[in-house]
């Protein structure tokens, strides 16, 4: 133990330290580090027995830290060396490769992974990453060029099968996602999935049609999963229940409707649908209880059974085997891998006969997962799984007890679930800023319902198809109950983001509060949770304001905060028929700051500015809306006109509309020319939010108000050449210009003409692709902070492009 525990703890620490690297070193540097660690380990093995225990622990911890740091860095450098060349972005690439996973439904078609075999640009061979993700529109596209036998006029991605080899023309780009505070890290997710490029299948006139080349036996598990998923869709007519059944059996979540995800979120049962690490953990642990009960029952007929294979061994091995089978068939996703390796380590240690205390076994499992997948340490699922296992260890878990009846087993399971939910509440709040009160009841019923009824029936349906009808009924009963709970006003509570140290203190408190410890320790655990629950994020001082220009791609969305008030300017673009930037970015930002907007300004009706109006209107019905257009027919929102010279003051900060003018009402102007222009603050620290006004409107404003100044100005129309004109820049004289535009957008915003104007005047600028969310404070008008710079790690896109 004096060597093993420090080594295991040092391994986890080494992985975490390497994950903080902003940029990778050369692979050779990591190789030298690994060699040093190996030599030091050999010396410690030979001579370390004569050292004092403290020295031994320190040396083994250092060896593990350096070794894990070096190995993780070397793996990352090797993977990064296979990345897509920037020279191939946006070009037509002819690629031959195998379909490496089952296609998944997307908003406007299908997505699938391809393992390239070879590729060309023109006649020149090029290298592609080992795995890429592609999108394909599933509706026919007439006019595709005729091609040899085996080709199709337009790719029907729903007919793709894993293992098929295809020849396709694709356009690719490096992984690039939005970068916002408290936002989802798309680039880390793609790194974890082994994906280094995404793109789409090119179809249309002048493009060689997709060509099926051959069928192979590659990816047999993926093909079996797709067969089962398609059979579920055919057998179950209701798309709601069919989507949930397919997700539970095969891990494919593409057919689950957006409203159902909201229901799962509010009731805290998402982990039961997505086959997460926590789902695998609970499934395997409950499988231990079921196998143990069956083994005890069988021993009544064969008394020698318990002597041949003791009950704990049979229960552990059987539960682990079922967990492995489920993890593999559900897609062998990264969360499932983490969970199953963790459980394998725990069971292996138990079966080895080593009487280690449970914290040591828990640390050993964490060490194993860290060596296999160090990037898991950055995911909520990793910590939720391990905290859940810690609670099961600390409370006794759902293992069968001698002489226990059905009622006793149910009471023990209910107690375990209640304790686990309470223990995980601080961690859930830390990662997601939300805790489902309804989840206390929902999980108590849903976990045994799903684990003991829905999932076994759904899996058995792969052999006996009619059982899926029973499974569909069970899912429908579950959904109705969850929807009733989600409709309750108290279903979920949100809390603002807390500092990391305060959050992890609360997590420790949550585990202590449910552990089998003296009452005083549990009371201290509850006290450790309280500071995180009572935390209130700091706000600007009176007379000052702060702002954040969110990264929403090709769209506009800005949040302005004063001492006691919040304003949202524009709501970002829609993201297909079922999502928008307000849902993905603005709501999480507002909730994690613990606030609701007092006012929402939508500059004009274009979708890249008004795409999230419906989402915000439903979430914050009491906000005051200001627009330049009629909102009642489409959105049902009662709004006020944002005409100049309307103004108000919040906490000593003036807000003033500069445009449009009252005389513009009824004029034949474009939507862009009617944009609301809002000035926040005044003088050299002001912020100007300009919508999509053109040079004509800018010039009129500049001539009408020659003393207009601002520290920061939003580039109108995303940096288009039709805006941000020289007269405007010379009048306003901003220190900074913020450009909200999409990565490799088809309009080529920002325009090089606009950038030359800025640089000629010495005006600094940032754009969303390279900066992510841009943030500033009126008390520091010379400073604009980029979220990408603050949070950059080596797996992130370099930004320019």
Image (spheres, rainbow, N blue to C red):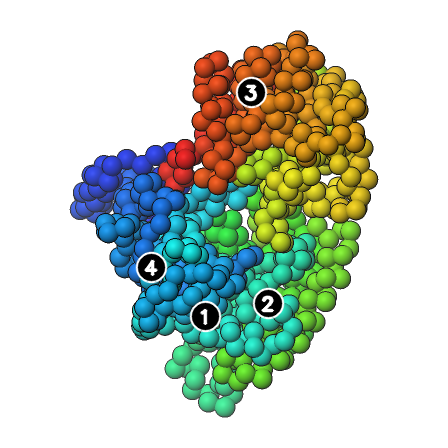
Q: Is residue 578 left or right of residue 193?
A: right
Identify the residue at horizontal 76%, vertical 23% (top origin). 661
Q: Earlier in the sequence, mark 3 or mark 4?
A: 4
Identify the residue at horizontal 37%, vertical 38% (top origin). 794
Residue at the far top: name it.
707
Whole-number angstrom distance, CA of label 4 to CA of label 1: 17 Å
Whole-number angstrom distance, CA of label 2 to CA of label 1: 21 Å
Rendered image: mark on residue 614: none
Task: Find disc 3 in the rendering and name its residue.
Answer: 725
Q: Earlier in the sequence, mark 2 or mark 3?
A: 2
Rendered image: mark on residue 115: 4
Location of residue 342 with respect to 294 vertically, above or below: above
Disc 1 crowd, CA 10 A, few/some/many (<14, 14-19, 20+): few
Task: Find disc 2 in the rendering and name its residue.
Answer: 244
Q: Earlier in the sequence, mark 2 or mark 1?
A: 1
Whole-number angstrom distance, CA of label 3 to CA of label 4: 47 Å
Identify the residue at horizontal 70%, vertical 42% (top origin). 613
Whole-number angstrom distance, CA of label 2 to CA of label 3: 53 Å
Q: Earlier in the sequence, mark 2 or mark 4?
A: 4
Quadrant placement of the C terminus = top left
Identify the residue at horizontal 72%, vertical 67% (top origin). 480
Where disc 4 sits, the SS reads: strand
Task: Find disc 1 in the rendering and name its residue.
Answer: 159
Q: Earlier in the sequence, mark 3 or mark 1?
A: 1
Circles 3 and 1: CB distance less than 8 Å?
no
Circles 3 and 4: CB distance less than 8 Å?
no
């Amino acid at each position: 133990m004096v060597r093993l525990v420090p080594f295991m703890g040092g391994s986890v620490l080494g992985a975490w330290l390497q994950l903080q690297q902003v940029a990778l070193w050369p692979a050779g540097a990591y190789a030298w580090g690994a060699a040093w660690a190996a030599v030091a380990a050999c010396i410690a093995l030979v001579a370390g027995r004569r050292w004092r225990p403290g020295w031994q622990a320190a040396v083994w911890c250092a060896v593990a830290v350096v070794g894990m740091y070096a190995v993780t860095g070397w793996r990352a450098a090797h993977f990064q060396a296979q990345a897509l060349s920037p020279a191939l972005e946006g070009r037509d690439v002819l690629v031959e490769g195998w379909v490496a996973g089952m296609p998944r439904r997307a908003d406007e078609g299908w997505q699938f992974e391809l393992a390239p075999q070879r590729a060309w640009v023109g006649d020149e061979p090029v290298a592609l990453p080992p795995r890429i993700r592609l999108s394909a529109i599933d509706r026919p596209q007439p006019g595709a060029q005729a091609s040899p036998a085996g080709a199709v006029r337009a790719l029907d991605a729903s007919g793709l099968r894993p293992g098929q080899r295809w020849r396709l023309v694709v356009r690719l780009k490096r992984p690039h996602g939005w970068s916002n505070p408290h936002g989802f890290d798309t680039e880390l997710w793609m790194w974890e999935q082994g994906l280094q490029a995404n793109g789409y299948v090119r179809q249309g006139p002048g493009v060689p049609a997709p060509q099926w080349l051959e069928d192979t036996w590659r990816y047999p598990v993926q093909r079996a999963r797709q067969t089962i998923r398609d059979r579920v869709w055919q057998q179950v007519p209701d798309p709601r229940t069919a989507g949930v059944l397919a997700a539970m059996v095969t891990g494919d979540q593409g057919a689950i409707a957006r409203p159902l995800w909201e229901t799962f979120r509010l009731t805290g049962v998402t982990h039961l649908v997505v086959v997460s690490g926590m789902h695998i953990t609970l499934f395997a642990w409950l499988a231990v209880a079921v196998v143990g009960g069956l083994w005890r029952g069988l021993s009544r007929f064969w008394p020698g059974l318990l002597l041949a294979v003791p009950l704990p061994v049979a229960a552990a091995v059987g539960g682990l085997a079922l967990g492995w089978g489920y993890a593999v068939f559900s897609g062998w996703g990264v969360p499932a891998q983490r969970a199953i390796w963790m459980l394998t380590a725990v069971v292996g240690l138990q079966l080895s006969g080593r009487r280690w205390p449970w914290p040591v076994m828990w640390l050993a499992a964490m060490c194993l997962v860290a060596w296999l997948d160090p990037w898991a340490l950055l995911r909520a699922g990793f910590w939720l799984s391990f905290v859940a296992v810690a609670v099961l260890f600390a409370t006794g878990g759902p293992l069968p007890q001698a002489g226990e009846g059905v009622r006793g087993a149910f009471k023990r399971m209910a107690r375990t679930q209640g304790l686990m939910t309470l223990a995980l509440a601080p961690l859930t709040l830390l990662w997601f800023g939300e805790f489902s009160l309804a989840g206390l009841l929902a999980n108590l019923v849903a976990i045994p319902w799903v684990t003991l009824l829905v999932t076994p029936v759904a899996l058995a349906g792969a052999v006996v198809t009619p059982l899926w009808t029973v499974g569909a009924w069970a899912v429908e009963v579950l959904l109705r109950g969850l929807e009733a709970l989600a409709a309750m006003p108290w279903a979920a509570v949100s809390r603002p983001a807390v500092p990391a140290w305060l959050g992890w203190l609360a997590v420790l408190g949550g585990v202590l509060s449910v552990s089998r410890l003296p009452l005083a320790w549990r009371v201290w655990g509850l006290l450790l949770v309280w500071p995180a629950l009572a935390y209130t994020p700091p706000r600007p001082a009176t007379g000052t304001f702060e702002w954040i220009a969110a990264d929403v791609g090709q769209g506009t969305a800005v949040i302005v905060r004063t001492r006691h008030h919040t304003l949202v300017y524009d709501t970002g673009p829609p993201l297909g028929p079922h999502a928008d930037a307000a849902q993905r970015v603005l709501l999480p930002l507002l909730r994690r700051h613990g606030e609701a907007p007092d006012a929402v300004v939508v500059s004009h009706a274009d979708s890249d500015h008004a795409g999230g109006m419906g989402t915000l209107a439903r979430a914050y019905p009491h906000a005051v809306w200001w627009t330049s257009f009629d909102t009642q027919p489409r959105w049902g929102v009662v709004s006020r006109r944002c005409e100049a010279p309307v103004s108000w003051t919040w906490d000593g900060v003036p807000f003033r509309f500069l445009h449009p003018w009252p005389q513009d009402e009824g004029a034949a102007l474009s939507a862009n020319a009617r944009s609301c222009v809002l000035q926040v603050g005044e003088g050299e620290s002001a912020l100007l939010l300009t919508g999509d006004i053109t040079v004509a409107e800018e010039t009129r404003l500049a001539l009408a108000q020659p003393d207009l100044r601002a520290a920061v100005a939003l580039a109108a129309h995303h940096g288009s050449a039709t805006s941000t004109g020289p007269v405007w820049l010379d009048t306003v004289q901003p220190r900074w210009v913020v450009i909200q535009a999409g990565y490799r957008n088809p309009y080529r915003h920002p325009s090089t003409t606009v950038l030359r104007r800025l640089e000629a005047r010495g005006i600094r600028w940032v754009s969303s692709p390279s900066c992510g969310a841009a943030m500033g404070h009126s008390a520091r008008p010379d400073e604009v902070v980029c979220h990408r710079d603050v949070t950059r790690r080596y797996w992130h896109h370099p930004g320019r492009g």
